[in-house]
Image (spheres, rainbow, N blue to C red):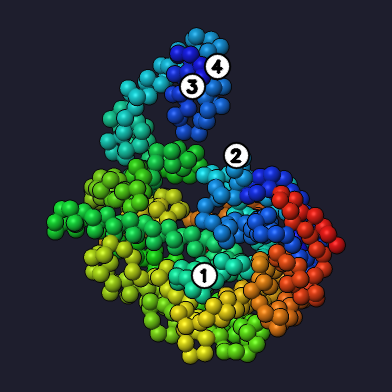
Amino acid sequence: MYEGAIQDLIDELGRLPGVGPKSAQRIAFHVLSADPADVNRLATALRKVKDLVRFCTTCYNVAESEQCRICRDARRSDEVLCVVEEPKDVVAIERTGEFRGRYHVLGGAINPLEGVGPDNLRIRELMARLGAGVTKELILATDPNTEGEATATYLALMVKPMGIQVTRLASGLPVGGDLEYADEITLGRAFEGRRAI
Amino acid sequence: MYVRRLELVDFRSYPRVAVDLEPGGSVLVGPNGVGKTNLVEALGYAATLGSHRVATDAPLVRAGAASAVIRCAIVHDGRELLVELEIVPGKANRARLGRSPVRRARDVLGALRLVQFAPEDMELVRGDPAERRRYLDDLLVTRQPRFGGVRTDYDRVVKQRNALLRTAYLSRKVGGSRGGDLSTLDVWDTHLARHGAELLAGRLELVDALAPHVAKAYDAVAAGKGAAGIAYRSGLGGALTPDRPALEAALLAALAEARSGEIDRGVTLVGPHRDELLLTLGPLPAKGYASHGESWSYALALRLAAYDLLRADGIEPVLVLDDVFAELDVGRRERLAELVGGAGQLLVTCAVAADVPAGLVGARYEVTEGDVRRAG
């Protein structure tokens, strides 16, 4: 145990995800020996993230104004809407540079064990957006696990009757990997989702 | 396939131990309570990532140690493969295959194939249906590792669906007639039927393939006293064939029919997690009718049948008989010895060396408190 402020900092850092007691101690002593200007910048960044960041009123991605950068971009297509669980999924898809439509961030997936049902997600808001009649295709990009699949099935059941095309991201083999190293579940799903060439 | 070397660090009673093993029959001899079973339990863990004795990992780590290590060198078709597992209770296990770390501990499954009979297996005959389902599913995964994923997916869906039904049940109890939010129940039904049909089809195929081996093994162990038969009993009823689309449709129909009952009771009542592997001896069910000796022979026959089936598939698993011979009379010992004599590697534990038929004793190891030594 250290005294006063340094122990307070170690305790606070230790509460962050992925930071254990050893890392917390290392970071705390790094901060202690760092240039005051650098530390101030970090402190400002921490304060600003709580003060300034809010959720986009259209897609519920993180934003610094009423709407996020993607929703404000007039060059993007309104006809394709991609549904994801978390804001970090938007960033992952944006990195591909493949997708030029809009997003909708649900804020999680249906998970009865955690008490998360459709009402706890931004599904009503999604339905309102689709109700405007501009969207032609809905891409379901929820995680390929039990909860993500259930959420995708739920949305598909609700949206299909509206006459909107519903698609699901393919799941399968990583590019650049060797078939022999793929685990049996991934390879099994890739077989199921195979396509003619 | 055989285990050439087993090393343990902080596993159960062993601070550190290493044993060099040989193909053919080996006997581990030692007084009760010195840790013979711990050695074979470690092998079982390396093969299945679970223990046949406990449900959680904490008891596997020596008191006072933070983690346990199991390291075994497995020779298969003349090639040696090193499997290393670090068991950290409450965290994900770390694993290495041939000295390189693997992404998930699951990736080492299949490196060591093992069939183990232990006194606890009596529960296969006398215990709940869950014991027999686990027996089937474990064997299914050993034969076709793909089913490891199917089983996990199915269990997860059942858990989620139960949570949903339970929440609705509780909110109805508290709030009167308002039924809670069951709007996603249809979604869980389709997923339960999809994964359930896959698991069910796998089990049905397995039971078909396994049945003749069980009859044969019981006949050998019990010397023709009574005929053992196994049959799969599904809540779907009737004669089922392993046809996935048909099973999926049948599960969906059964779910629709059971729905009001499920909502009333707050639990999933349909699916392979409620099925049973029926064991019969002559015209009677083994459970409740079989004597102690018959139950014991039956449990042994189930393990030997699994071993036979894997061998028929071209897999040569390691066979472990933990504390078996003390329970048998001389005639049965000899018959069992005949049955397993041809095993690629057979590990037998016993407290009294004279209990093991001479034909099975190749190498002999003496187990003392915290140590194992080759004795001849």
Circle 1 SS class:
helix
Instruction: Return the residue at label 3.
Output: A10
- Mark in front: 2 vs 3: 2
Same chain for mark 4 and mark 2? The answer is: no
Residue at mark 4 to residue at mark 2: CA–CA distance? 31 Å
Label 4 chain ID: A
Question: Circle 4: is it few (<14), some (14-19), or many (20+) Cα within 10 Å?
Answer: some
Seen in the picture, residue A81 relative to A56 is either above or below; the reply is below
Select label 4 or label 1 by which is in front. Answer: 1
Residue nearest the viewer, comparing B138 with A170: B138
**Horizontal placement of B77 versus A131: left or right?**
right
Figure check: B51 above or below B356: above
Check disc 2 and give the amino acid type. Gly
Q: In this rendering, would A189 be left or right of B100? A: left
Q: Which residue is mark 2?
A: B64
Q: Who's the residue at 34% across and 59% down the image? A: B161
Who is closer to the viewer here, B10 or B308?
B10
Task: Tell me the crowding category of disc 2: few under 14, some 14 to 19, or many 20 or more residues within 10 angstroms, Cα based.
Answer: few
Q: Which residue carries the number 4 mark?
A: A29
Q: Nearer the viewer, mark 4 or mark 2?
A: 2
Q: Nearer the viewer, residue B104 or A92?
A: B104
Q: Identify the residue shown where x is 37% and y is 19%.
A: A47
Question: Residue at coordinates 60% horizontally, 81% vertically from top-left?
Answer: B214
